Image: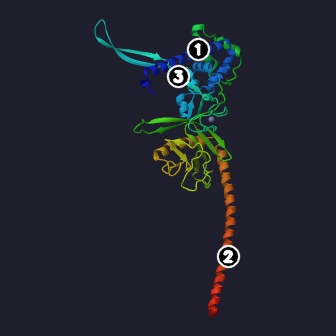
């Protein structure tokens, strides 16, 4: 609902919620600033909190910490929607967005000349916004693709969504500067407090801060063309990956999209040339075969684009510029529409770049080669057994034919026996 659709009562409630949020954000910021002023030994711990909250500013980190010190990973409601998650509205944490400047020209009458003149005017606003910690979110409409928690239930702490993100902490000096700004009205912040902190544990010998451990989310983007009801736009998806050398392959878990596996193609020829890979949509799609071989099951966490669920696998030649043949299957019968396939093609190309850049890439390729060699050895064994079986069959047929022919000869020589 946009603000212009609201009734007066709704608008008043919306304003009251925002005003309360702004007051809460300011109180939390002041509370944490005073706490750090009086306990500067807490500054390094606060810097780790800031590193996790990437990309929020130090002052917003004070506001978030003051309202929810247990927050590990926060995002705006709209972002959580993109992750395929619903939020508990009561868990809102209030931050102040970077200021927005509005400039306009207005017409003013000049009292002396009596003429109307154009005058530049403008104002600055610091909008208040709400963000939500991961703990206050749950998978919506489908199980969590990261940990399989059913929809509507809370993911365990081990779920990557619940975990802090990897990030670079601000320096102690940056924190001191933010503290000085917040405490300006109440005596400021004395930066000499930093000298009592000793060696910075988060700084390498070059003076650069270390990245703190956490989940490293990566991003892919899909450009969707214009449609009657929509402007062209770019949708960003965040993903994490895990390498499985037993399979071998890489599982890409993409928030708001689903799971895609990339593996060396199991029937690759190994005689040089192209190195095709198998793209699998969802988990375990081969486990459950339908009696109708043209029917494709969608595996768990199968990706969905434009409300179309992908199923089965595609074989892709990463070096081939020509992707005309790229026609992934959809759940049930048939292939996905061309536009949707093109969008999946954008995703697969970006994932392939990632896959081929992995430090484990050689190990995955080698594991794939070994599996194919094992398969060929098994097939060769099977072939030997099959051939000897066939030979016995042929010998039997020959014997039958000879016996038959002998009977015919006997009958021809002894017509009286008929
Ligand atoms: Zn989860």
**Real-space Cα distance between discs 1 and 3?**
15 Å
Q: Which mark is residue 396?
A: 2
Number of marks present in the image shown:
3
Horizontal and vertical percent position of residue 43: 66, 18
Left or right placement of residue 10 versus residue 185 in this view: left
Residue 81 appears anywhere in the view:
yes
- Residue 205 placement: quadrant: top right
Q: Is mark 1 within 8 Å of ligand 1?
A: no
Task: Work out whether mark 1 precedes mark 3 in sequence or the reverse, and give the earlier one.
Answer: 1
In this figure, which residue is indicated by the disc labeled 3?
A: 129
> Quadrant location of the C terminus?
bottom right
Local crowd at mark 1 within 10 Å, few (<14), some, or many (≥20)?
A: some
At 48% across and 44% down in the image, what residue appears? Answer: 340
**Figure quarter occupied by ligand 1:** top right
Q: Residue furthest bottom?
A: 416
Residue 318 appears anywhere in the view:
no
In this figure, which residue is indicated by the disc labeled 1?
A: 27
SS assignment at label 2: helix
**Real-space Cα distance between discs 2 and 1?**
94 Å
Horizontal and vertical percent position of residue 273: 58, 53
- Residue 294 placement: quadrant: bottom right
At 28% across and 8% down in the image, what residue appears? Answer: 114
Task: Work out whether mark 2 precedes mark 3 in sequence or the reverse, and give the earlier one.
Answer: 3
SS assignment at label 3: strand
């Amino acid at each position: 609902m946009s603000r212009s659709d609201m009734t007066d009562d709704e608008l008043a409630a919306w304003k009251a919620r925002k005003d309360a949020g702004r007051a809460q954000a300011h109180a939390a910021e002041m509370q944490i600033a005073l706490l750090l002023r009086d306990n500067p030994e807490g500054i390094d711990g606060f810097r780790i909190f800031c590193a996790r909250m990437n990309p929020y500013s130090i002052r917003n980190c004070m506001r978030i910490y003051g309202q929810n010190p247990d927050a590990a990973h926060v995002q705006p409601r709209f972002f959580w929607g993109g992750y395929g998650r619903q939020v508990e509205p009561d868990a809102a944490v209030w931050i102040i967005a970077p200021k927005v400047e509005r400039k306009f020209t207005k017409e003013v009458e000049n009292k002396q000349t009596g003429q109307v003149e154009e005058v530049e005017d403008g104002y600055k606003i610091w909008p208040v916004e709400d963000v939500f910690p991961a703990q206050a979110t749950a998978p919506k409409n489908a199980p969590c693709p990261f940990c399989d928690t059913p929809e509507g239930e809370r993911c365990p702490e081990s779920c990557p969504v619940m975990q802090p993100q990897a990030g670079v902490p601000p320096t102690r000096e940056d924190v001191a500067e933010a503290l000085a700004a917040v405490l300006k009205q109440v005596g400021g912040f004395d930066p000499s407090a930093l000298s009592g902190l000793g060696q910075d544990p988060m700084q390498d010998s070059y003076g650069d801060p270390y990245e703190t451990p956490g989940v490293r989310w990566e991003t892919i983007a899909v450009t969707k063309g214009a449609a009657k009801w929509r402007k062209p736009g770019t949708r960003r998806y965040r993903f994490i990956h895990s390498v499985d050398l037993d399979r071998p392959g890489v599982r890409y878990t993409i928030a708001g999209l689903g799971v895609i596996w990339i593996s060396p193609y199991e029937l690759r020829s190994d005689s040089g040339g192209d190195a095709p890979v198998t793209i699998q949509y969802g988990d375990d799609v081969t486990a459950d075969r339908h009696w109708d071989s043209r029917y494709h099951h969608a595996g768990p966490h199968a990706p969905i684009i434009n409300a179309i669920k992908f199923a089965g696998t595609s074989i892709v030649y990463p070096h081939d510029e020509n992707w005309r043949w790229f026609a992934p299957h959809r759940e049930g019968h048939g292939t996905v529409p061309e536009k949707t396939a093109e969008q999946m093609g954008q995703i697969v190309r970006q994932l392939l770049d990632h896959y081929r850049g992995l430090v484990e890439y050689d190990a995955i390729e080698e594991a794939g080669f070994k599996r194919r060699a094992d398969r060929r050895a098994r097939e060769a064994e099977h072939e030997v057994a099959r051939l000897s079986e066939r030979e016995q069959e042929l010998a039997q047929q020959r014997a039958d034919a000879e016996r038959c022919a002998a009977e015919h000869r006997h009958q021809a020589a002894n017509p009286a026996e008929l």
